[in-house]
Amino acid sequence: MAMSPAALPLPSPLSSEHGALLAQFAARAETASLLWASGYLAGLARALDAPAQPQVPAHPDAGVRTTVLYGSQTGNARRAAEALHARLEAAGLPARLLRADAYPLRELKDERLLYIAISTQGDGEPPDDALAFVEFLSGKRAPRLPQLKFAVLALGDSSYPQFCAIGQRLDARLSELGAVRVAACANADLDVETIAAPWTETVVGLAQELLKRAPPQAAAAHATVVPLRPHAVPQAHGRERPFAAEVLANQRITGRGSARDIRHLELSLEGSGLAYEPGDALGVWPRNPPVLVDALLAALDFDGDAVVAHTGTELPLREWLSSKREITRLSRPFIARHADLAADDALTRLLSPGNAAQLASLLGSRQLIDLLQAAPARWSADEFVAALRPLQPRLYSIASSRKAVGEEAHLAVAHVEYDNGDGLRWGAASHFLASRGDGDRAEVFIEANERFRLPADGARDIVMIGPGTGVAPFRGFVQERRETSASGRNWLLFGNPHARSEFLYQTEWQQALKDGALHRLDLAFSRDQAEKVYVQDRLREHGRDLYAWLENGAHVYVCGALAMGKDVHAALLEVVARERGVDADAAADYVAALQAQGRYARDVY
């Protein structure tokens, strides 16, 4: 936890100016940043105070370093990997940190110590930045690895049946290839830190032992620093210290005939110091629907004002349920505990391996209140709070460019609200945002998405595939390209059920076509004719043009639902195979090369 300025040991040998700068950094920095800085400063001090020493190369021999590899969709695995890397550096251990898609696969055969933090998304899918790594490791080209020692931190969401599946799969595959597991695969749910923190301490200790290094106190004093990247000025606001952004606009952008309530929101970032690029996401810390909180308290006969202590924090029960705990999503561990308390054999049977489909249906269609009402059980308030997972922020693709809108961030949010037969149910963050009026505030932060960036060369063409609210980042892309006078062509493929009521940002796209900011727009409104038509069908239909754009150096971007992303990927493979006149394997190699070059990027969820 960051120190307050007053807690710093001042006066000191520092000048007042330097002391103030250090105090400011310590007050704002997260734990991982403080740990990294301690090793960095110790190394600088050693370099200034001692005779010239041989420098540790930027990429030391694999036998005397740890490689920390991560695959992350929403940033959790990245943060866990960064924290581990910082601890290794603070301990004076040579280490490198790599995103999975930046890892040179040819180096795997020479790797000696590999730590992996990787998330699972959807129905057991790898994060986009780890697709190539997972496919390589799973395939015939993966080498035997008897020299490798490894450990895996698997991240997931137990409200999905394939909880932590990718991490478990990599753990098993590395062992199958002859690598030696030095720590059991750690499976982390949404409360990542409860698993990641002890796992990190364990594997850092193992690295010290395996690399035969001195303990942290001795090693830090002899650290040699190799800067990995320019030092960014820490932002005043982040995930753990969000900014209270004022809502400037909240407008429904679907027509009255639509069953979907999609909102365009504009939030002020003025005074926050937050900066974003097109393709980044806005993290939103929601509050749960008050009506749902009241229903839970009534179902359990709890007093909302009763104070509950958990993990060193004391809060009224109502506040725990409003802002600290997930109550709109079920999880397997909660179902298991509730089945025990309710002595419900049918619920217990649902958790057996043979009932995966039924469990998936329950997790996908029912919320906490439904379970409590269908199978009553006696919980204590303390145990109930402990059994629920921490409330997590939701990430929304930013639908604007700062060059166009200034100190604002725009969002396109699908309001989740439905009646499941037992009453109205809501999505936590979408309902929270849809309920915000002008002048209300929402706690937000920026989640950078380095994998989803416009090409540095503005002369490159781009193809944007974004049905539904997946079109959001492409509004920002087009704004950015207009503001920077990019000369490359912009092609948008958009789809939704109905053109009349669900053509999101219609007037903006039409104006962009008119003024040349958008060069091509292809539409797929699936329910406006007898035969359903989707964006992937438009890709196949215009495959010759798509392939010509690709051969001319175009970048392709896909944003939206995971199932759509799979269908678009399949269509892209078909187009390449047909237009290139090659088989499926060669088409897959072509598309994989696009990904490796950063010319095929996906943001699917």
Image (spheres, rainbow, N blue to C red):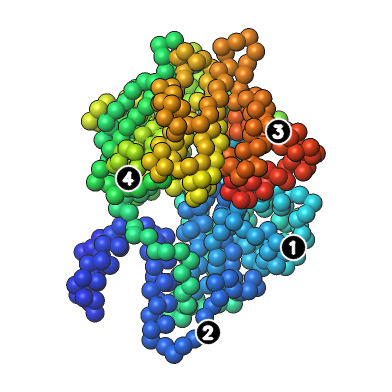
**Residue that numbered label 2 is attached to:** 54
Indicate the quadrant containing the C terminus: top left, top right, bottom left or bottom right. top right
Tell whether 268 sits left or right of 108.
left
Asked if 274 appears above or below 145 in the picture, the reply is above
Identify which amino acid the numbered label 4 is placed on. Pro
Q: Earlier in the sequence, mark 3 or mark 4?
A: 4
Residue 322 screen position, x and y as percent = 34, 33
> What's the distance in space between the residues labelled 3 and 2, CA to CA?
53 Å
Q: What residue sits 67% from the left and 27% below the top?
A: 540
**Residue that numbered label 4 is attached to:** 242
Q: Earlier in the sequence, mark 4 or mark 1?
A: 1
Tell whether 493 sits left or right of 86.
right
Q: Which mark is residue 145?
A: 1
Residue 194 screen position, x and y as percent = 47, 51
Identify which amino acid the numbered label 1 is placed on. Leu
Mark 1 Cα within 10 Å, few/some/many (few <14, many 20+)?
Answer: some
Mark 3 Cα within 10 Å, few/some/many (few <14, many 20+)?
Answer: many
> What's the distance in space between the residues labelled 1 and 3, CA to CA?
37 Å
Q: Earlier in the sequence, mark 1 or mark 2?
A: 2
User: Are discs 1 and 3 less than 8 Å apart at CB?
Assistant: no
Residue 370 or 237: which is nearer the viewer? 237
Identify which amino acid the numbered label 3 is placed on. Val
**Residue that numbered label 3 is attached to:** 575
Q: What residue sits 46% from the left and 69% below the top?
A: 227
Q: At numbered mark 3, what does the secondary structure look like: helix, strand or loop?
A: helix
> What's the distance in space between the residues labelled 4 and 2, CA to CA?
43 Å
Q: Earlier in the sequence, mark 4 or mark 2?
A: 2
